[in-house]
Image (cartoon, coloured by chain):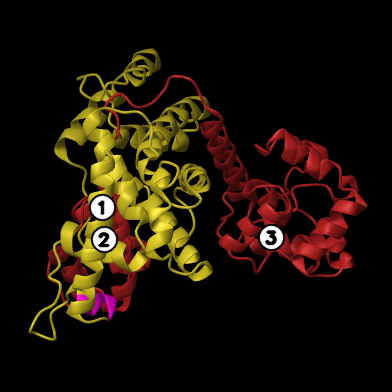
Amino acid sequence: MTNSPPRRSTPLRNVLYELVLAKPTPDAALVDAFVRHYPEYASELTEYAIELALDALAAQNEPIDGSVATTTPGVSRAMSRFHHRLSAVRKGPDAEAARAAPAVENPFATLTRAEIRALGQRLHANTVFIMKLRDRLIRGDTMTEGFLRRLADELGVLLETVVAHFAAPAYVPSRAHFKADTKPEAGEQQTFEEAVRNCGLTPAQQQALLNL
Amino acid sequence: MVRPLTKRTGSGDRYTRPPNIEAVIDAALALDWPALHQRTCVRDRRSPDYLPSECLVHLIRKAHRDHHDTMRDQLLAILLGRCEATLAATLPDGRVPNAAYVRDEALGRLGELFAEDGTGDHPDELDYFEVRFNAAFAALRTDLVREEVRVLRRASPVPDDEAIARRPDAVLRSPATPEHGLFLTQLCHAIQTLPPEERDAVILCHIMGYAEEADDPAKRTAATICGVTGRTIRNRLTRAAAKLSRFKEAL
């Protein structure tokens, strides 16, 4: 990092990347230099540097010949997230989705990442499955009433709110940008059972959801 | 000519790839797909034919821009496979409470970064990964770990000494690896199992090199960072040392 005149506020994530690219294992001098440069992120930088120092210690144990030739379930799930996100990015921005559909409350909209994960655990599901529910990529008419009621209970909303959510067209997250030449369309929806079977859930999780 | 990066540092300078990475990318771009695919099968990082992950990131982004979807997907799967191996080493079960979730989330988040490349609020975030892939990936997963640790600290009280003493299995839980790597992994686990305030004191003083305290009140020390006195920091280090020495004896 170099000394520089006063600057515009830099997003935290950019500052964190800058820190880690400056030195793999941050030491006191480096962290202090960053804290002087970005005093608004002093506590985040210190917290982050502590975790980074532990990570660097563990990384020394990384094998020289690390990766395997076959595609593992973990890689398959990550590839699935790539394609899912790519599809959303290509479909279009919120404005287009909003124009295509009347305003419908999305009961998942205010959930943080931690809350989404917690919801997944309570439902015996995972984050991928909850994201599909959030983005209306599962057809509401294929869900059992038991599941809809359970979901409404867990979200703390009326059953009607959940039913209306799934009746609306597929949702495109706000970070997406419309790049296609044609008018955006609603996302491809799966049946409830297809979604349960294709979200990387264990057989026990699948059975629990299908039995609701 | 390799496409230049657009991401800039906080000082306004453009990031640049290391010269050796530029050279490998240049050479890789001249290969046809069969030859390139053969190079991707080299898994020994010491081999001259090994394609660094920075190079793979560049090739994946280029294949995506050029609509070579099959090539893009094959290269991305290879890169994610490497990352999965890295995650197994850096985030073994026990390092954080939900290690399996964090590993999955880190891998999935990286996949999503490729999907979002060139769009949104951070269109050139993958530039970091073309400069020093391992560091940038460490940044990504560390951010997730930091979030997990914060959730844990909010959700559960600080364990007492007896609780720590009852967890030797957690300290010693680790995949089978060469002796040196085993020690590092276990030491990392041992530090992680310390109560948060002791863990932070150990990392700040013994890994990052902060002084316990200083006469100059303006100087950042372990005491000022943790908001306690130097004496408290020393007490925490003493307690941590006792636990870590028990771990060392157990080896």
Q: Within the image, what quadrant is residue A211 found in? A: top right
**Residue B225 lies in the magenta-colored region:** yes
The answer to whether the residues at label 2 and label 1 have Cβ atoms under 8 Å apart is yes
User: What's the amino acid at mark 2?
Assistant: Ala
What's the mark number on residue B115?
none
Task: Decide whether the magenta segment is chiefly helix, strand or loop.
Answer: helix
Q: Which of B113 and B180 is in front in this view?
A: B180
Q: Are marks 3 and 2 in contact (CB under 8 Å)?
A: no
- The chain displayed red equals A
Q: Mark 2 points at which residue?
A: B240
Q: Which residue lies furthest to the left in this view?
A: B215
Q: How far apart are marks 3 and 1 (CA)?
A: 57 Å
Give the chain coloured yellow. Answer: B
User: Which residue is label 3 attached to?
Assistant: A96
Q: What residue type is labelled 3?
A: Glu
Q: Are callouts 3 and 1 both on one chain?
A: no
**Which amino acid, mark 1?**
Leu
User: Judging from the image, what secondary structure is the residue with disc 1 in?
Assistant: helix
The residue that label 1 is drawn on is: B244
* Residue B123 seen in the current view: no
Q: How far apart are marks 2 and 1 (CA)?
A: 6 Å
Q: At 40% from the left edge and 50% from the top edge, which residue is drawn?
A: B141
Q: Of residues B240 and A8, which is closer to you in this image?
A: B240
Please determine whether, in this image, residue B233 is positioned above or below residue B130. below
Residue at 84% from the left image edge and 67% from the top image edge: A161
**What is the chain identity of the residue bearing mark 3?**
A
Q: Can residue B237 be seen in this view?
A: yes
